[in-house]
Amino acid sequence: MKKQIILILLIAFLLAGCGGSAATEPTQVPTLAPTETPVPEPTLTPTPEIPLALLVLPADMDQETSDIYQTLVYDLAQSAGMRFQVRNTLTMEDLEPSLRVVIALPPDPGLMELAPAAPQAQFLSVNIPDMVAGGNLSVLANTERPDIAAFLSGYIGAMITVDYHTGLMIPKDDPVGQVMLAAFRKGQEYYCGLCSPWAGPFNDYPLFVEVPADAPLNEYNAYADYLVNHTVETMYVSPQFATPELLTYLSSSGTLIISDLSPGRKYGNWVATIQPDVIHAIQNTWPQLVAGTGGVNITSPLILADVNPEHLDAGKQAVAQDVLSQLQAGQILTGVNP
């Protein structure tokens, strides 16, 4: 019996030793809620508008001349990363904020009023009469030497006109008008001396008519009639009088015309224009316009332009060009103090 009790106790002891400890609850790792990394709102940067260059040309300009100016300014605008547009007129509505350069040819679109309204842009007046440089308006004048243009006009007029029947329309009570008259006479004399007609009428050519500054535009034809009625065949027209109406009237009368302002379109009676080399002048001025530098008067050498070979053939044109080169080099003197 004792052996059985001992055996039972022994088995109980062994069972107690083999029993594991109570199962341990696993330690739960707390689940962390995901943290959202804030994404910054994108900053919208406005795309800058491409700067604009405008070329203002008359609607009736002949296609050949128009193409020359458009190609020139288009190429310049492209080189500066600008847009390019052409206008026939210019108004306040055209002065958009992206406007940077305006180049305008006659007739005047009102540059003296428009330029101050667009201070972000530079304006260039090309051969428009009565412009005053200042602020953001630069002026390429038709000529700073009216004596040279008039001298050469007198020379060409005598060279192409039978019996030297030449004349001038000049401003009255204006010192520049007197310079034009004196220089024209000197140019004619340089070609033919006394230039006395060999057949009647025996007028003292060159004849001239003086037009008052306040003369209405519709009276210009009447002033021109004085010269036409006195058999003037070739006429120098001071640029301020070279309106389309007058040029059309003189064309219908068959009177040949020389001036230092381009007519803008072709007239059958136009001989030549004695004007600054506008193309090179614009090219040379362009960097200043793009840089925002303006308000200056621009000079350029004179050239023969708008030449009509029916009235001034290649040989005579070469002679006239040689005289012009000598005038600008000071080898021929106009004899007039400009």
Image (cartoon, rainbow, N blue to C red):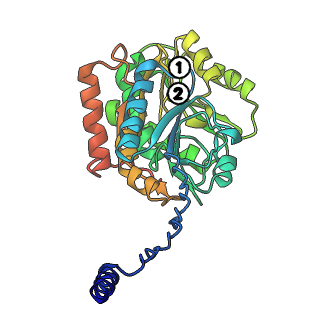
Would residue 188 be visible to someone looking at this image? Answer: no
Q: Quadrant of residue 154?
A: top left
Which residue is tagged 1? 232
Q: Secondary structure at mark 1?
A: loop
Q: State the residue at coordinates (38%, 31%).
A: 71
Would residue 33 be visible to someone looking at this image? Answer: yes
**Amino acid of disc 2:** Gly
Q: How many marks?
A: 2
Residue 269 lies, with reference to residue 45, above or below; the image says above
Q: Compare residues 53 and 176 and report the one nearer the observer.
A: 53
Q: State the residue at coordinates (60%, 53%).
A: 132
Asked if the residue at tag 2 contacts the one at tag 1, i.e. Cβ–Cβ closer than 8 Å, the answer is: yes
Which residue is tagged 2? 167
Q: Compare residues 291 and 176 and report the one nearer the observer.
A: 291
For the residues labelled 1 and 2, the Cα–Cα distance comes to 6 Å
Q: Could you tell which of marks 1 and 2 lies nearer the N-terminus?
A: 2
> Could you say where residue 249 lies in the image, as x and y percent from the top left?
62, 15
Which quadrant is the N terminus positioned in? bottom left
> Could you say where residue 176 lies in the image, as x and y percent from the top left?
56, 48
